[in-house]
Amino acid sequence: MAAKHPDQEFVEYVVKAIVANPGDVKTDRVVDEMGVLITLHLNPADMGYVIGRQGQTARAIRTLLKIVGAKNNARVNLKIHEPEGSRRSRSVDTDTSVVDDLKI
């Protein structure tokens, strides 16, 4: 297995600290012309912890992740994979972010 990048390690560290099932937290990292995409996989029971009320926790993680990426001159986005059996009944695009570009 390849060494994990600082942005990927950051996501795993933060998410594992707030979920009830840290052993189920996994990330995939893909780099393309749009930048870096980190896909977060977790236990369906932990979706509420990671998303938070009105998406506040997920938004905060994304904002911090963009700062970690900016430090390495990379555009980093986070997608939360919605597992089968999660309590959310409707499909939500979790790849959108309030902070589109971090201009430093």
Image (cartoon, helix red, strand yellow):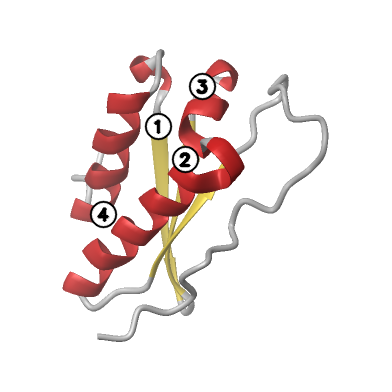
Q: Nearer the viewer, mark 1 or mark 3?
A: 3
Measured as percent of width and height from the top left, residue 100 is found at: 49, 75
Name the residue tied to disc 1: 26
**Labels 2 & 1 near each other (Cβ < 8 A):** yes
Measured as percent of width and height from the top left, residue 8 is found at: 29, 48
**Labels 3 & 2 near each other (Cβ < 8 A):** no
Kind of residue at disc 2: Leu
For marks 1 and 3 on the same chain, the one whose residue lies earlier in the sequence: 1
For marks 2 and 4 on the same chain, the one whose residue lies earlier in the sequence: 4
Q: Callout 3: 10 Å neighbours few (<14), some, many (20+)?
A: some
Checking the image for residue 40, the label placed there is 2
Q: Quadrant of the C terminus?
A: bottom left
Kind of residue at disc 4: Asp
Q: Label 4, label 3: how many angstroms apart (C-alpha)? A: 21 Å
Q: Label 1, label 3: how many angstroms apart (C-alpha)? A: 13 Å
Name the residue tied to disc 3: 46
For marks 3 and 2 on the same chain, the one whose residue lies earlier in the sequence: 2
For marks 4 and 1 on the same chain, the one whose residue lies earlier in the sequence: 4
Measured as percent of width and height from the top left, residue 36 is found at: 40, 65
Q: Label 2, label 4: how many angstroms apart (C-alpha)? A: 12 Å
**Labels 2 & 4 near each other (Cβ < 8 A):** no
Q: Secondary structure at mark 3?
A: helix
Name the residue tied to disc 4: 7
